[in-house]
Image (spheres, helix red, strand yellow):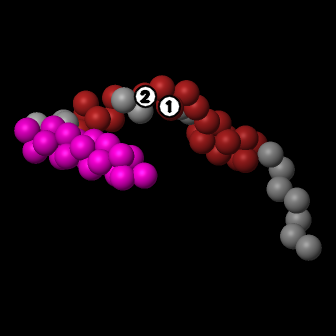
Amino acid sequence: MPEGDDRRRALVARIAAKAAAAPHVARDHADRASQFLPFAALTGYEEALRERERQSPREPPG
């Protein structure tokens, strides 16, 4: 098992060195938001629900 521990330590050391060499640079807000556009497939869904609620007769409480 020591061989696995050595490999793990070497991997962690490489990752740490890479992270230290290239610091994180924050992306522009609009640029970050664009990555989520594929999830906006239901654009207009909430408006459609509100319109349907508005048009549907409400049942009396009770």
Secondary structure beneath label 1: helix
Main secondary structure found in the magenta portion: helix
Can residue 17 be seen here? The reply is yes
Q: Quadrant of residue 10?
A: top left
Say left or right for 45 vs 60.
left
Residue ranking furthest to the right: 62
Q: Write down the region rendered in magenta.
A: 1-21
Residue 52 pos. (x, y %) = 73, 41
Compare residues 9 and 20 and report the one nearer the observer.
9
**Quadrant in the picture for the C terminus:** bottom right
Q: How many marks?
A: 2
Q: In the displayed structure, would residue 2 be above or below residue 55?
A: below
The disc at residue 58 is none
For disc 1, the neighbor class at 10 Å (few under 14, some 14 to 19, many from 20) is few
Residue ranking furthest to the front: 2
Does 39 lie within the magenta span? no
The three-letter code of the residue at mark 1 reads: Ala
What's the residue at 83%, 56% (across, down)? Answer: 58
Compare residues 28 and 18 and report the one nearer the observer.
18
Residue ranking furthest to the left: 21
Q: Quadrant of residue 32?
A: top left
Compare residues 28 and 7 and report the one nearer the observer.
7
Residue 24 pos. (x, y %) = 15, 42
Circle 2 sits on which residue? 37
Q: CA distance from mark 2 to mark 1?
A: 5 Å
Give yes or no for contact between labels 2 and 1 (Cβ–Cβ under 8 Å).
yes
Secondary structure beneath label 2: helix
Say left or right for 35 vs 62.
left
